[in-house]
């Protein structure tokens, strides 16, 4: 079935487009982008076949060419589908938290058409065989799944994983996410190999020796709640180390879930020297601070932790000025019982796929300093380029990965409506703007709100 999207405001930064246009999708690709496209001017014969469905042919005497669904997108924004470089799908090994199928459904609910799952599953994605198994499991996913492979075997930091085999199998990047490779000699060998293979490395920046059992940001709120804190230095030190190592090794370094003011300064410094580096920020880090933690509860526990107001404002500045390149969620679902306890016992993690666009639009565009085009660049165009996929672009001939959203629609975030198995979020009840109405992957409607 083909699609005709009518009356949308198209935001397509890759083609410098921001105006009302119709989009015709044929065989999974963008076929036409013009003003006032009409089926009757495109085909000689058009017959309504149901609500919004039409049979079309060259003429009344010719065989039916195809069935076309018409979506009236009046009042909606059309954008290239979002690309999330950082998610945890938990399969294999932790399917009670999430599966590739449910994670993909959650992504579609949030307008995310491509997801990059991290390798910290059980077993770890650290070999060609594991990657192929993951891709086989992903065949039922309603969105595109681009795997990320581990840097070391079992993510144990002792032996370099089969980087060449995983590249051959289809990974788009390498990461030890969930921890840092603390053996710098071993890490340098891996970085050099990644550079030879043309694979970017995604760094979880955390010096474990400085965390000391911390469960939230070190500051007045951690003192008030009587909980051990995590200081900014534990993140900043590894960020600087990894950038310098990657430059020496000749590989692109992407910093995951940056949360501190100094991280913005470090990335700015590295880019000023011409280093090949990029950085991501999560919606929870630019939306919420540790001052807003109301109680000692697992829903507020994430890694890196919610930081100070100063850190939050620096992250927003970094996104606005294109110092920080992308917005990713670090979607990390857990079972309800695991999170419904003190931060001392609960696992780190927050779900994010289904709230990322609404939180980002509300905080950064509607109430913030960025344009909608800039936001789409951070959520679609740039992340696509970083992993070398042909997405984030709605030019004629490109894959029809499209999200339609109502940016004027205000609603309350309700975890009970999530399609993810994980409901762990501190944003329940928060009012936001920007409801995703349709998500289209390869020309197929995979979510309809």
Image: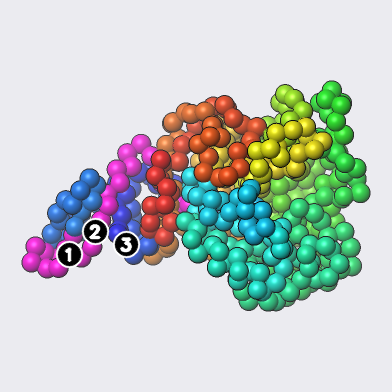
Q: Position of residue 314 (x, y in %)?
A: 72, 37
Query: Is any part of residue 410 visible from this angle?
Result: yes
Q: Nearer the viewer, residue 350 or 173?
A: 350
Residue 355, picture quadrant: top right
- For residue 67, which numbered disc appears in the image? 2
**Which residue is found at the position 76% from the left and 53% from the top?**
178
Between disc 3 and disc 2, the foreground one is 2
Q: Position of residue 317 (x, y in %)?
A: 68, 38
First of labels 1, 3 by sequence position:
3
Kindly identify which residue carries mark 1.
64
| Residue 79 inside the magenta-drawn segment | yes
First of labels 3, 2 by sequence position:
3
Range drawn in magenta: 56-85
Q: Nearer the viewer, residue 238 or 178?
A: 178
Whether residue 207 is situated above or below residue 219 in the rendered picture: below
Please rate how many residues cluster around mark 1, counting C-alpha atoms within 10 Å: few if below 14, some from 14 to 19, many from 20.
some
**Which residue is found at the position 50% from the left and 64% from the top?**
139
Would you say 63 lies left or right of 348 here?
A: left
Question: Secondary structure under badge 1?
Answer: loop
Please rate how many residues cluster around mark 2, counting C-alpha atoms within 10 Å: few if below 14, some from 14 to 19, many from 20.
some
Query: Is any part of residue 381 visible from this angle?
Result: no
C-alpha separation, residue under disc 3 versus residue under disc 2:
10 Å
Q: Nearer the viewer, residue 320 or 172?
A: 172
């Amino acid at each position: 079935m083909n699609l005709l999207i009518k009356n949308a405001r198209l935001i397509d930064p890759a083609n410098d487009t921001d105006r009302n246009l119709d989009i015709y999708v044929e065989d999974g690709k963008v076929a036409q982008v013009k003003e006032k496209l009409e089926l009757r001017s495109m085909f000689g014969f058009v017959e309504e076949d149901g609500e919004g469905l039409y049979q079309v042919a060259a003429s009344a005497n010719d065989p039916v060419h195809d069935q076309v669904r018409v979506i009236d997108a009046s009042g909606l924004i059309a954008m290239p589908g979002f690309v999330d470089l950082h998610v945890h799908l938990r399969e294999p090994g932790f399917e009670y938290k999430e599966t590739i199928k449910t994670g993909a459904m959650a992504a579609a609910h949030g307008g995310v058409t491509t997801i990059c799952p991290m390798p910290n599953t059980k077993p770890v994605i650290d070999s060609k065989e594991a990657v192929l198994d993951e891709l086989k499991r992903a065949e039922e996913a309603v969105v595109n799944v681009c795997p990320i492979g581990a840097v070391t075997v079992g993510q144990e930091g002792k032996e370099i994983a089969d980087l060449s085999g995983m590249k051959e199998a289809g990974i788009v990047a390498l990461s030890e996410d969930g921890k840092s490779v603390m053996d710098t000699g071993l890490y340098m060998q891996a970085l050099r190999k990644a550079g030879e293979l043309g694979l970017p490395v995604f760094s979880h920046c955390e010096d474990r020796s400085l965390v000391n059992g911390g469960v939230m940001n070190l500051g007045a709120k951690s003192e008030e709640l009587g909980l051990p804190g995590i200081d900014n230095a534990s993140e900043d030190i590894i960020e600087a180390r990894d950038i310098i190592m990657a430059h020496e090794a000749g590989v692109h370094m992407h910093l995951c879930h940056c949360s501190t003011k100094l991280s913005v300064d470090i990335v700015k410094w590295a880019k000023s020297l011409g280093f090949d580096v990029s950085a991501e920020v999560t919606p929870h880090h630019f939306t919420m601070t540790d001052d807003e933690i109301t109680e000692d509860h697992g829903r507020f526990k994430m890694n890196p932790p919610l930081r100070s107001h100063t850190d939050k404002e620096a992250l927003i500045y970094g996104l606005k000025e294109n110092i920080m390149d992308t917005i990713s969620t670090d979607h990390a679902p857990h079972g309800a019982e695991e999170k419904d306890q003190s931060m001392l016992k609960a696992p780190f993690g927050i779900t994010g796929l289904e709230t990322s666009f609404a939180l980002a639009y509300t905080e950064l565009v509607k109430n913030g300093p960025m344009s909608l085009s800039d936001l789409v660049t951070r959520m679609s165009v740039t992340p696509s380029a970083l992993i070398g996929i042909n997405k984030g672009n709605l030019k004629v001939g490109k894959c029809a990965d499209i999200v339609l959203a109502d940016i004027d629609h205000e609603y309350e975030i309700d975890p009970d409506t999530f399609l993810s198995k994980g409901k762990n979020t501190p944003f329940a009840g928060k009012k936001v703007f920007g409801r995703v109405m349709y998500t289209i992957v390869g020309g197929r409607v995979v979510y309809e709100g």
